[in-house]
Image (cartoon, rainbow, N blue to C red):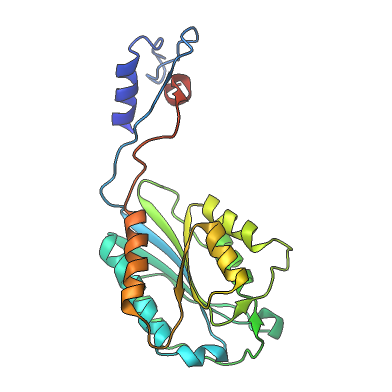
Amino acid sequence: MKALTTRLLALNPNAGDVNPQNGSYAANQDSGQEYSVQAVRCKRPGCAKIGMSIDGTGSTKSFQNGVPAIAGYALRALGGSISKVDVDLWKHGDEDCGEEPVQLVQSGTVEQAIDAIGTIQYQGGGDLEETHAEQVQRLLDVTAWGSRITYCRNVLLMFLTDDTKPLKSGKSMGQLGAEIKAKGVKLILVCQSTDYLQELVNAAGGFLIPISNDPNTAEIQKVMNSLCNTMTKMMTSVGGTIPMSAIVA
């Protein structure tokens, strides 16, 4: 941010007087001028926080080879593009059937998460739709997301083998997706495309990887490349113009 401030002061060296207590510049109230601002480009984020949940119901048995394969590829792709990856891994089911979510890994490494995925026993379930959206909302609310946007990236990765039931709160999938996007979290759903799930992905500006027991690695690579490119880029500019007082006051 020092480079950004220096640039701004160079644009208007007479912006105002220096505050003797903290050395900041007071904006010149008479000028009323506005300046376009260029943000500093960052080569690579320092960390990624991944909140991840896998459908542990019996319906996932049909994908018991594909789930760990896709998860391993996705996690290692993130690990290869970002300095430190921190994973919270959950298993969830249908809460309407008494299948409460269980956290398997907290703040673990990529390899710890991959090992834990291999221990999951898929059982229960049976409904055509399950409470997946409740788990999405839970992870969005309870995960300790990184707050330093110039340093850390946030990813919500969900493996679902059936459609989701509506949220009990009455919130729509579009509203949930918008909430994910507003928090600066990138959503990846590994699932079958349904109206509800596609609405969620679209509203979040996320990605959908088709679930398969024999996954197409080229398709997964394409999604992960796109995600990693998005995550390793910084804004090159702040849209529009910003009053000098809002930056240096």
Image position, residue 198 (x, y; %): 56, 67
Q: Is residue 119 left or right of residue 85?
A: right
| Residue at image coords 57%, 87% | 57
Q: Quadrant of residue 216?
A: bottom left
Image position, residue 180 (x, y; %): 55, 57
The quarter of the picture where the N terminus appears is: top left
Q: Is residue 120 left or right of residue 175?
A: left
Image position, residue 124 (x, y; %): 61, 92
| Residue at image coords 53%, 58% | 204
Image position, residue 183 (x, y; %): 52, 52
Tell me if I can see residue 53 in this picture: no
For residue 68, above or below residue 32: below
Image label count: 0
For residue 29, above or below residue 102: above
Q: Nearer the viewer, residue 111 or 43?
A: 43
For residue 150, above or below residue 199: above
Q: Nearer the viewer, residue 135 or 212?
A: 212
For residue 201, above or below residue 4: below
| Residue at image coords 34%, 57% | 47
